[in-house]
Amino acid sequence: MRFAIAESTPQETPQVLVQLESSVLQLENPWKLTLLIHYPEPDKIHINLPPLSGVLVLDRIKTAIRTMEQEPWTAVEYVFIPKRLGSFTLGPLEIQIPGKRILTSPQALTVQDPLEAARTPIPRLYWSDSNEALRVGMPVTLDLHLKGSFPLTDLAQDLRTLSVQLVQNALVEPLSVHEKDRAAGIIYRIGLTPLQKGALFLPEASFTMGKQLIRSEPKQLIVSEGAPERIPAVQNNKDQLGEDQINNNQFNKDQTNKDAAGPLHTSEPQTAFPAFIPGFPWSVIWPLVSPSIRPVLQESKQAWEAGDPAKALSILRKKERDSTLGPFYRQIRASVETEAQLHTGPEEWWIPRGALYVLAGISLGLALIVGLIKRKRMAVLVLACSVLILLYSVLGQSLLVPLIRGGTVAVIRETTAHTIPEASGSISTRFAGGEAVLIQHSTDTWAFIVASGQRSGWVLRSALVVY
């Protein structure tokens, strides 16, 4: 369902969608392939089919005009009869339009005997069709189906290998699947929010069943503009309607302009800053340590109430990493993230420099004492431990931990991520203010970050709070 441009001209290339009835064909049973071409004149479209080599026999062709995005598209429907068992690749199909030549991506297909399919069908992984029209900024729910004769209860181990890739120009949020739906063959569910008008590729999914790698059938949908304007039922709804339309228009603004202006800031936090109540056994020593923790909590709370959750959480994370009371700050930070319903980010590695310096000093003194009593091997061992503690306390934050983890932890402000380090690049995902991320690569103005849920992309460095 993806397409590639083999030759191009300065003019815009029409979009081409390839719709397959299924990637698993039944021998001697009709199978349909549909081309949707964003070009309104069918008579000027010429399509060259690839060699079929006796695997498929063309039965009939049907051409029609469909209205999509309130614009005319040419739909060319091919019906084939599979004549030979086995796996093969169909394509690419060549589409010639005045001044353009477009090649579709090859499609991997399998022909199966109907009688054999009834006994041992080839596993089929595919996304369901949405019952709603896809519009910019409007979330829809999509289900990933696994079709076959095997009991789904036996797939629990295999489904742990399920991988769902990122999708460009849309936000993807994993949703829970009820047992009843799982028994019906739904193994994964997402909430998908398109961010741009045009063609949208659904996420590519795969998992390993035994020794066989099962991939989802490619699928592409068309996204229209945001929700149409609503007419208020009564005059009293006018103010609320205007507010809704303003919100929709604000969401649908060009993301490039947003990034050019820098990261997004919220005028007020989504939730109140939660009060921290330590549990046992921390509550025992809380009265002793609270005088030194309360000023930090007040500073973090002020940043939170000022509408900068990224700064608020970075204050807590810095203390969590550097302070001798790091375990307390970890509990506070985790409770704030939970209340704000933020994705759980990478944990901080505790590097309490003050305590480590004291420990290193004690180790050096112990090494000196052991050396004086002529226990050389023990003295060398203790001295080596002292050096390691000093190295970790001095270089752990800036060098050792980032090297082991593969990046530096930072907190991000609300912003969008791109597939390339340019504001004109496709949007890969969106981050909420206060999420912790891992910086893997950076340039003067951009940084490539990775977050929970297999989300990644390039963001402006000004959107990151590094502490």
Image (cartoon, rainbow, N blue to C red):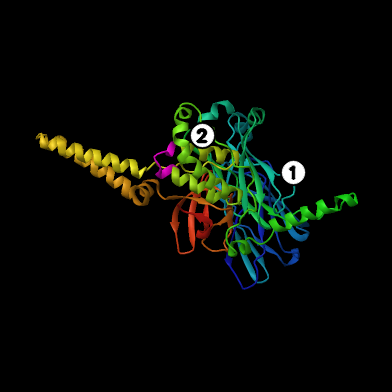
Residue 243 is left or right of residue 186, and the answer is right
Q: Position of residue 269 (x, y in %)?
A: 63, 48
Tag count: 2
Q: Is residue 312 visible?
A: yes
Camera-side residue: 124 or 304?
304
Outermost residue toward the bottom? 10
Residue under label 1, please give it: 131
Hey, which quadrant is residue 44 in on the image?
bottom right
Q: Is residue 309 magenta?
A: no
Camera-side residue: 318 or 55?
318
Give the vertical position of 367 relative to 306 (above or below).
above
Q: Which residues are magenta?
A: 320-327
Q: Position of residue 19 (x, y in %)?
A: 67, 50
Residue 70 is left or right of residue 178, and the answer is right
Residue under label 2, please give it: 160
Mark 1: amino acid? Asn
Q: CA distance from mark 1 to mark 2?
A: 28 Å
Q: Position of residue 423 (x, y in %)?
A: 57, 63
SS class of the residue under badge 1?
loop
